[in-house]
Image (cartoon, rainbow, N blue to C red):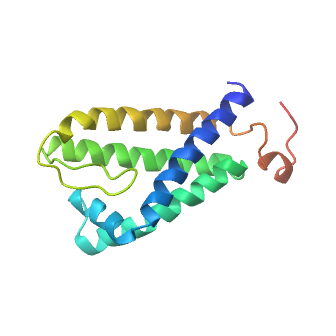
Amino acid sequence: MTTWTGVAARLLLAAVLGYAGLVKIQDLADAGRSVELYQIVSGNTAQLVGGALPFVEVALALLLIAGLATRAAAVATALLMAVYIAAIASVWARGLSVDCGCFGSGSALSSGAERGYAVDIARDLLFLGAAALLIRRPRTHYALDRWVLDVRDE
């Protein structure tokens, strides 16, 4: 992998996480309701997760844009993607019909959401792959890690 591929992975993940987080921050109560629709955690816990998750996504996006603590941010992103994939697979396996809420408000759907689950999982697997690339080779061009850690070009 070239350092330019790493830059692309960093910026892709930063754009996705930043957009998803900023959209959800606009209505934190709705973000909590979206988490609740998955029926994995109780209502109060879902509200807490839904309220905190957008800020985690934005923080990871900022770290990835800056290229600061890139490996740690990539590990956190990979874990987040794995949780998202597991949650989507869970509602699919249980026959629930919900909009993922990945980029804004999720909602219960009357039918047809099942078709989108495979697309959502495939998309998140792509992002998981980008995070895995950064875990393996976190040093990229235009990254603050190079200056903070005094790392020379490879």
Q: Nearer the viewer, residue 2 or 104?
A: 104
Q: Does residue 94 lie above or below 62 as drawn?
A: above
Q: Does residue 2 lie above or below 110 as drawn?
A: above
Q: Nearer the viewer, residue 83 or 16?
A: 16
Q: Does residue 139 lie above or below 26 as drawn?
A: above
Q: Does residue 57 lie above or below 5 as drawn?
A: below
Residue 95 drawn at (x, y percent): 12, 44
Furthest-bottom residue in view?
Answer: 44
What residue is shown at x 65% (from left), y 46% (from top)?
71
Kindly indicate the quadrant of the structure image that contains residue 118.
top left
Residue 19 drawn at (x, y percent): 51, 51
Whether residue 135 is visible here, answered yes or no, is: no
Whether residue 24 is visible here, answered yes or no, is: yes
What residue is shown at x 77% (from left), y 45% (from top)?
143
Query: Is 121 left, or right, of 112 in this rendering?
Result: right
Query: Is 131 left, or right, of 32 in this rendering?
Result: right
Quadrant location, the C terminus: top right
Quadrant location, the N terminus: top right
What residue is shown at x 64% (from left), y 33% (from top)?
8
Residue 41 drawn at (x, y percent): 25, 64
What residue is shown at x 51% (from left), y 61% (from top)?
56
Residue 136 drawn at (x, y percent): 63, 35
- How many numbered marks are there? 0
